[in-house]
Amino acid sequence: WNTLRGAAAASDRFAGVAVNADKLDDPVYEEIVREQFNSITPENAMKWESVEPERGRYDWAAADRIADYADANGQQLYGHVLVWHSQLPAWLGEGDFDAAELREIMTDHIATEAGRYRGRVDRWDVVNEAFNEDGTFRETVFYDKLGEDYIADAFRAAHKADPEAELYINDYNTDGLGPKSDGMYELVKKLKAEGVPIHGVGFQGHLVLGQEPDSMRANLQRFADLGVDVVVTELDIRMETPATEQKLRQQAREYKAVTDACLAVDRCDGVTVWGASDADSWIPGWFEGEGAALLYDEEYQRKPAYYATRLAFQIE
Ligand code: G3I
């Protein structure tokens, strides 16, 4: 249990990481992914634009590579993502379909992708980022045409395609208590009451140093009490760069606090970080002047946050 995956598995949880297929050619990256993590999430390879760039033409190369890699290394596979308004192929994002056709496109896509990986994906993000910050539904191509029913329809289609997979809804800024998290809570409660096959809620955990929510444990617990599992799905804690020793220590405390919040909840299955190292992170490309958000630095050296996260799993 001197690794993240070993320590996590000892308490029946997972330590996960988002991966990109092409990076697995880098032996330093590959060794970290294999030795430290017992769950992997394709960062981009299973997104709609990646697998179906043109209508009816599928490209599974990168997604297959990651699925095979997980099998070969005894890792769980977290599928990401079946229905999301972002990273849609142009033919869909820019297409103008009526409701009936769009519903069919959506359920066909789910049947095809979840069907292909049937029995191999442990968890699927079925619907991603369905909410606005105030807890109302986000207006997306799916919501605008199909109304909120698209969510239940997506879960039913996924369950039909892969009855064994645990089906998740996932979002950001829902980590602590608040209006967006309340919106998610009401939806999950309603879906459960209606018998929709939803099994888990993912909390992305894209956090900013110094703003880690203290209500995270209570929030995860209230969802667990609805009868679903919970997972921290995309954890990173970004800071203004350059990193200083003091900021890295604070980051370590916050990684431990988030991991502890998960471990305090019986139904929290694990924590996934959104990239192996600071060299792999999406943050610098999206937030100017920010970064250093992950467990390994740009030279693939362990940061204080690595040790703190491992310690949280070890002492559980
Ligand atoms: O694939 C092209 C490549 O061919 C091209 O050379 C390169 C040049 O920029 O771009 C590549 O596409 C990039 C893609 O990642 C794959 O690397 C896109 O530009 C880039 O926008 C895309 O960013 C991803 C982002 O989702 C897109 O929304 C990030 O890597 C990924 O970390 C991020 O992940 C999301 C989760 O899926 C959902 N939750 C939020 C999270 C962070 O935004």
Image (tube, grey):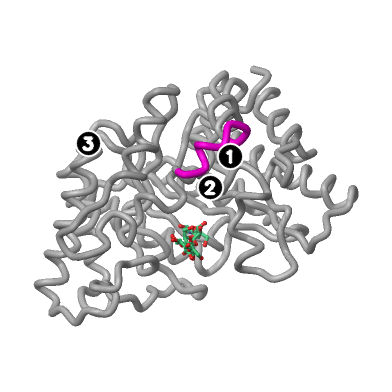
Q: CA distance from mark 1 to mark 2?
A: 7 Å
Amino acid type of the residue tagged 3 in the rendering? Arg
Sequence-wise first label, 1 or 2: 2
**Which residue lies under the disc numbered 2?**
220
Q: Closer to the N terminus: mark 3 or mark 1?
A: 3
Mark 2: give few (<14), some (14-19) or many (20+) Cα within 10 Å: many
Disc 1 marks which residue? 262
Disc number placed over residue 235 in the picture, else none: none
Looking at the image, which is closer to me, 287 or 200?
A: 287
Observer-nearest of 66 and 200: 66
Is 98 drawn above or below residue 75 in the view shown?
below
Crowd tier of the residue under label 3, counting other residues whose Cα lies within 10 Å: few below 14, some 14–19, many 20 or above: some
166 vs 136, left or right, is left
Q: Which of labels 3 and 1 is toward the front?
A: 3
Q: Is residue 264 visible?
A: no
Query: If the image is split into quadrants, where does the C terminus sit?
Result: top right
**Type of residue at label 1?**
Cys
Point out the stretch of residues depicted in magenta.
22-29
Residue at 33% across, 57% down: 50
Q: Residue furthest bottom?
A: 96
Q: Nearer the viewer, mark 2 or mark 3?
A: 3
On residue 118, the disc is 3
| Count of numbered badges drawn on the protein | 3
